[in-house]
Amino acid sequence: MGRAERGRTESLNRGRPTVSVTCIADGWAHRVPDIELTSEMSQSDGYYQAVCGHRVAAASMVEPDGRPCPLCTEMCRTTRS
Ligand SMILES: [Zn+2]
């Protein structure tokens, strides 16, 4: 996990439902907390904060899903309680 520059998402990463969002920048399908997807702040700049810390530039909904991000997959697995 990279440096936590945005502390506001720290508390969102545990036990939250997530949605798979493919990033057009790296082609991975990241897990984004669904609260991020419904946040007006996130929608305004087009980026979402994935659970791995990656800033996801959301691909078009018609794009096929990319390969699952291993970091996101790992974090979702290990934080499931
Ligand atoms: Zn990821």
Image (cartoon, rainbow, N blue to C red):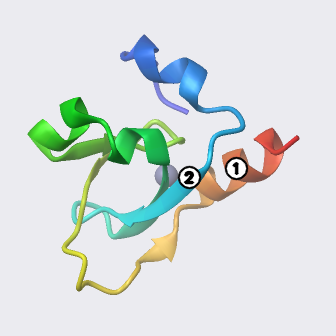
Quarter of the view holding residue 64: bottom left
Q: Amino acid at mark 2?
A: Thr
Question: Do tag 1 and tag 2 residues touch (Cβ < 8 Å)?
Answer: yes
* Vertical side of 42 occupied by 68: above or below: below
Label tally? 2
Give residue 48's mark: none
Screen quadrant of the N terminus: top right
Quarter of the view holding residue 4: top left
Residue 8: x percent and y percent? 42, 15
Q: Amino acid at mark 1?
A: Cys
Q: Residues within 10 Å of mark 2 (few under 14, many from 20)?
A: some
Give residue 76's mark: 1
Q: Residue at x 46, y 36 (%)?
A: 53
Point out the frontmost of discs 1 and 2: 2
With 79 as the anchor, is 70 left or right in this view?
left
Residue 17: x percent and y percent? 61, 49
Residue at mark 1: C-beta within 8 A of ligand 1:
no
Q: Secondary structure at mark 2?
A: strand
Q: Secondary structure at mark 1?
A: helix
Pick whichever, 8 or 27, lies toward us: 8
Residue ID for mark 2:
18
Q: Residue at x 53, y 41 (%)?
A: 51
Q: Which is more N-terminal, label 2 or label 1?
A: 2
Q: CA distance from mark 1 to mark 2?
A: 8 Å
With 74 as the anchor, is 68 left or right in this view?
left
Q: Residues within 10 Å of mark 1 (few under 14, many from 20)?
A: many
Residue 39: x percent and y percent? 30, 36
Q: Residue at x 37, y 17 (%)?
A: 6
